[in-house]
Image (tube, rainbow, N blue to C red):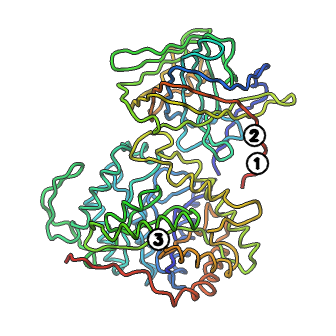
């Protein structure tokens, strides 16, 4: 049967969990890329199985929210939770707001920049200890936003003194979208070997998109128990 | 109504030194028995890299072995991936013709283009291109079979004039099929005069609508081969047992295991936005199938349970226009081999005779060729 994650989740839930929802009007990017199998299993909990091949998702957004301007980057590992494709949150950086609703697992304050460089779009992500990762989307071209799909995220929530898995659905109202092939996420030089930004680096690009519109994540909720065959 | 068996060849972990050997031997034993029992066809997929789910990357070899241990059962290449990073159209035509010869004219030739990023990415294939290359290949392969010498200048493939050899034993050539996992592909099959090799399990109403549209469209087709192959083939699970409750329970375990494995794959559409893959294909259909029935009930279209129940299900498939049903018999050896063989025997004894007097699957209608 499929491999299960090996991440121990006790203690991963933030003390003050904000289930969201997060609603952001602006632009965001989503990169999908293949990652190392062992690294993926390290960042997946036991209730999540790994897909074949293992992949990660990087969601980077900037825009306006009800709480003010917000920029964030969320790095997740693709997994199957309750037989559905989900992104399991591994790390997040937030800039401009006190917290990151719905995706508020291991979020840290930092800097997130989305910049256009010639025909390319570049993302730079830094945490409190310095640069974490960079992503480049080469020559994105316009596509029909309806072609894009958005998997929900799995995050860690406190419940009854324990850490449990919660799901945060994603929905979008997209005014425009562009697609890039060959986009990769590269970890910053000198990162600690245990950092998810280093472990979940790109082995093979799959796809990347840039979207303008409204992004909604959450509210995160703990699903009812389900028996699987 | 004709019946066949269908192989993904799924191999359970842990993979010991002989695990794959044992699974292949079990499959060959099942095929040999199915031939003796009067099953009409055996199909095997071409999949790559799909851990546990399918270890069937060289179906032409497996199917040739099937042909060598059987007498009558037709052998279905289901399917040749018509993407240059996977195969070559000349080689595909040559291998198919050789299979047809050594099997005594028993080949059914399925075509397709892969639907998972797992495979497309692994082969460095561009998902945006697969439909175009598939369309080109299905038009030229029958010409390689039927023309003494063939030359071609195309978009994704070209070759100088050569004799592509050998030629198939079946004249003008083996029946051609298209794997249908995405809604709409059955219309691609109809427009090209090809059989619909359905790989989804959807309920009766959904399939009835698709089959009706296929039948309507194929009347006006421009066949890519030398004849129109108007047939609808579908895939189902089979576990037949005298005890309906046990049969249904075991069958649901089989279906659930298969679906669970399928869910671990990465559909092309899921990771790579492209008009070439407008939807998720097989995976959501499997998910729906696994969860379509209320707790304690059997999903309506599955051929699991006792013979009486299975007969009723097949009658419904027949009434919506299906010509052939191919059965998945196992998934990662969830069902012990002896029970699989017993299920085949019981099905052949109690169910097949009920459909024997029905009109056979439509013979290919010749529309010219040589």
> Residue A56, relative to residue B55: is it above or below?
above
Nearest to the observer: residue B328 or residue B324: B324
Which mark identifies residue A226? Answer: 1
> Residue A34, relative to residue B33: is it above or below?
above
Which quarter of the figure is the C terminus of chain A placed in? bottom right
Quadrant of res B289: bottom right
Badge 2 sits on which subunit? Answer: A
10 Å crowding of disc 3: few (<14), some (14-19), many (20+): many
Q: Which residue is mark 3?
A: B233
For the residue labelled by badge 3, is the local secondary structure a helix, a strand or a loop? Answer: strand
For the residue labelled by badge 1, is the local secondary structure a helix, a strand or a loop? Answer: loop
The answer to whether the residues at label 1 and label 2 have Cβ atoms under 8 Å apart is yes
The answer to whether the residues at label 3 and label 2 have Cβ atoms under 8 Å apart is no
Badge 1 sits on which subunit? Answer: A
Nearest to the observer: residue A176 or residue B156: A176
Q: Position of residue B310 (x, y in %)?
A: 64, 77
> Residue A72, relative to residue A154: is it above or below?
above
Q: Which residue is mark 2?
A: A223
For the residue labelled by badge 2, is the local secondary structure a helix, a strand or a loop? Answer: loop
- Residue name at image x 41 percent, y 41 percent: B274
Q: Position of residue B277 (x, y in %)?
A: 43, 47
- Residue name at image x 33 percent, y 16 percent: A118
Nearest to the observer: residue A65 or residue A131: A65
Measure how far apart labels 3 and 1 are at the Cα level.
34 Å
- Residue name at image x 43 percent, y 59 percent: B46
Measure how far apart labels 1 and 2 are at the Cα level.
8 Å
Quadrant of res A167: top right
Nearest to the observer: residue A151 or residue B261: A151
- Residue name at image x 70 percent, y 23 percent: A105
Q: Position of residue B238 (x, y in %)?
A: 61, 72
């Amino acid at each position: 049967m499929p491999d299960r994650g090996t991440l121990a989740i006790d203690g991963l839930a933030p003390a003050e969990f904000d289930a969201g929802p997060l609603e952001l009007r602006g632009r965001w990017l989503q990169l999908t890329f293949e990652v190392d199998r062992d690294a993926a299993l390290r960042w997946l909990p036991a209730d999540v199985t790994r897909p074949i091949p293992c992949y990660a998702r990087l969601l980077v957004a900037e825009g306006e929210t009800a709480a003010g301007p917000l920029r964030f980057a969320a790095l997740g590992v693709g997994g199957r939770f309750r037989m559905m494709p989900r992104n399991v949150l591994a790390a997040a950086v937030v800039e401009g707001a006190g917290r990151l609703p719905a995706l508020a697992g291991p979020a840290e304050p930092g800097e997130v920049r989305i910049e256009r460089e010639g025909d390319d779009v570049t993302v730079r992500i830094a945490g409190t200890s310095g640069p974490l990762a960079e992503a480049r989307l080469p020559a994105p071209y316009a596509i029909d936003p309806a072609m894009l799909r958005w998997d929900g995220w799995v995050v860690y929530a406190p419940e009854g003194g324990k850490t449990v898995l919660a799901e945060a659905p994603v929905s979008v109202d997209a005014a425009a979208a562009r697609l890039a092939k060959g986009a990769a996420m590269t970890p910053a030089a000198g990162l600690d070997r245990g950092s998810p930004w280093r472990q979940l680096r790109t082995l093979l690009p799959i796809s990347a998109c840039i979207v303008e519109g409204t992004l909604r994540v959450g509210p995160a909720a703990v699903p009812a128990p389900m028996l699987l065959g | 109504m004709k019946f066949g068996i269908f192989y993904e060849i799924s191999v359970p972990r842990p993979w010991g030194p002989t695990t794959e050997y044992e699974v292949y031997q079990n499959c060959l034993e099942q095929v040999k028995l199915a031939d003796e029992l009067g099953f009409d066809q055996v199909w095997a997929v071409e999949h790559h890299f799909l851990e546990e789910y399918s270890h069937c990357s060289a179906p032409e070899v497996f199917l040739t072995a099937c042909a060598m241990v059987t007498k009558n059962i037709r052998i279905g290449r289901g399917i040749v991936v018509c993407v240059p990073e996977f195969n070559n159209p000349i080689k595909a035509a040559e291998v198919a013709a050789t299979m047809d010869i050594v099997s005594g004219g028993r080949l059914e030739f399925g075509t397709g283009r892969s639907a998972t990023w797992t495979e497309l990415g692994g082969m460095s294939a561009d998902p945006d291109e697969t439909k175009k290359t598939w369309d080109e290949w299905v038009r030229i392969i029958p010409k390689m079979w039927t023309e003494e010498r063939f030359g071609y200048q195309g978009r994704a493939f070209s070759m100088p004039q050569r004799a592509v050899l050998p030629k198939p034993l079946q004249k003008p050539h083996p029946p051609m099929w298209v794997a249908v996992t995405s809604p709409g592909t059955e219309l691609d099959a109809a427009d090209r005069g090809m059989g619909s090799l359905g790989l989804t399990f959807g309920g009766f109403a959904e399939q009835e609508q698709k089959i009706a549209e296929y039948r309507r469209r194929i009347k006006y087709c421009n066949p890519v081969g030398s004849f129109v192959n108007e047939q609808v083939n579908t895939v189902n699970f089979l576990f037949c047992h005298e005890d309906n409750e046990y049969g249904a329970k075991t069958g649901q375990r089989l279906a659930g295991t298969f679906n669970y494995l399928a869910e671990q794959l990465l559909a092309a559409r899921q990771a790579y936005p492209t008009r070439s893959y407008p939807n998720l294909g097989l995976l959501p259909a499997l998910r729906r199938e696994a969860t379509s029935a209320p707790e304690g009930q059997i999903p309506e279209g599955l051929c699991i349970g006792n013979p009486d129940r299975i007969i009723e299900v097949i009658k419904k498939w027949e009434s919506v226009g299906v010509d052939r049903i191919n059965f998945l018999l196992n998934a990662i050896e969830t069902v012990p081999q002896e029970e699989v063989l017993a299920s085949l025997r019981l099905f052949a004894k109690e169910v097949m005779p009920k459909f024997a007097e029905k009109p056979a699957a439509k013979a290919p209608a010749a529309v010219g060729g040589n």
